[in-house]
Image: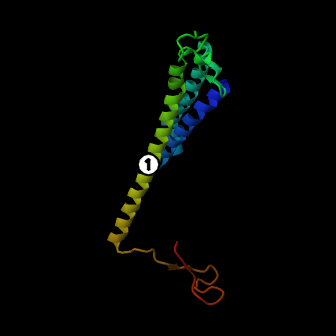
Amino acid sequence: AIFLQLGTLGSPLYNFALAVYYLGIIKLNLTPTQFRQRFEIYLHVVSNIYVWFSVVFLSVEGSFNFTRANCWIGPKPIDCVVNPEVDCISGANAPLHQWVFAGTPILFSFLGNIVSIFVLIWDIIRLKRKLRNLAMRSGSWRPQAVPIQSNADSSNANVNGRATYSMFR
């Protein structure tokens, strides 16, 4: 149950941290060093401390129980929350704990990843339009090929006697 909680909650939070990293590097034009100084410690603290806190809290509360499919956050016995005739031995608050320590963080991470992807896509589209407008103003729609200077005799001829061209200089 502990490893299931660590993986189920830790993985989405780290994926969200990576999405924030890409936003910082691409959208905010931060260097990796600047990102490390400003944001990295907080992302590590949230993703590690929250996950380990949830493991300790759920263990102390007795919310790790068998849940028909595996051993994770659930009441013991399974029907005690929905059936008033059955007394809960442990995990009486398991539905609340499922939302606080699994559902909400996973949903937040998923939505945060989706938003970051759309922000990056929108930024790329905006940049592409800006570059197209700059190219239209300068009058050059396509890059111009320029002759390459040969190191041997500084002529533009290659082995076959034809000029060699490149898009880059």
Q: Which residue is drawn at 49% across and 78% down?
A: 145
Residue at the extreme left of the image, as rendered: 137
Judged left or right of residue 31, residue 129 is left
Q: Residue at x 65, y 89 (%)?
A: 160
55, above or below 60, in the image: below
Question: What's the residue type where badge 1 is placed?
Answer: Phe
The location of residue 96, given as percent across then percent down, is: 50, 20
Q: Can residue 169 be seen in this view?
A: no
6, above or below 124, in the image: above
The location of residue 169, given as percent across then percent down, is: 52, 72
The location of residue 74, given as percent across then percent down, is: 59, 20
Question: Quick one: SS at disc 1?
Answer: helix
Snapshot quadrant of residue 164: bottom right
Of the 4 image quadrants, the one containing the N terminus is: top right
Depth check: give the residue in front, 49 or 152. 49
Q: Can residue 8 be seen in this view?
A: yes
Q: Which residue is drawn at 52% across and 12% down?
A: 84
Q: How many marks?
A: 1
The location of residue 133, given as percent across then percent down, is: 34, 66
Figure coloring: rainbow
Badge 1: how crowded within 10 Å, few (<14), some, or many (20+)? few
Depth check: give the residue in front, 79 or 19. 79
Judged left or right of residue 48, residue 39 is left
Q: Residue at x 38, y 57 (%)?
A: 126
- Residue where numbered disc 1 is placed: 118
Residue at the extreme bottom of the image, as rendered: 161
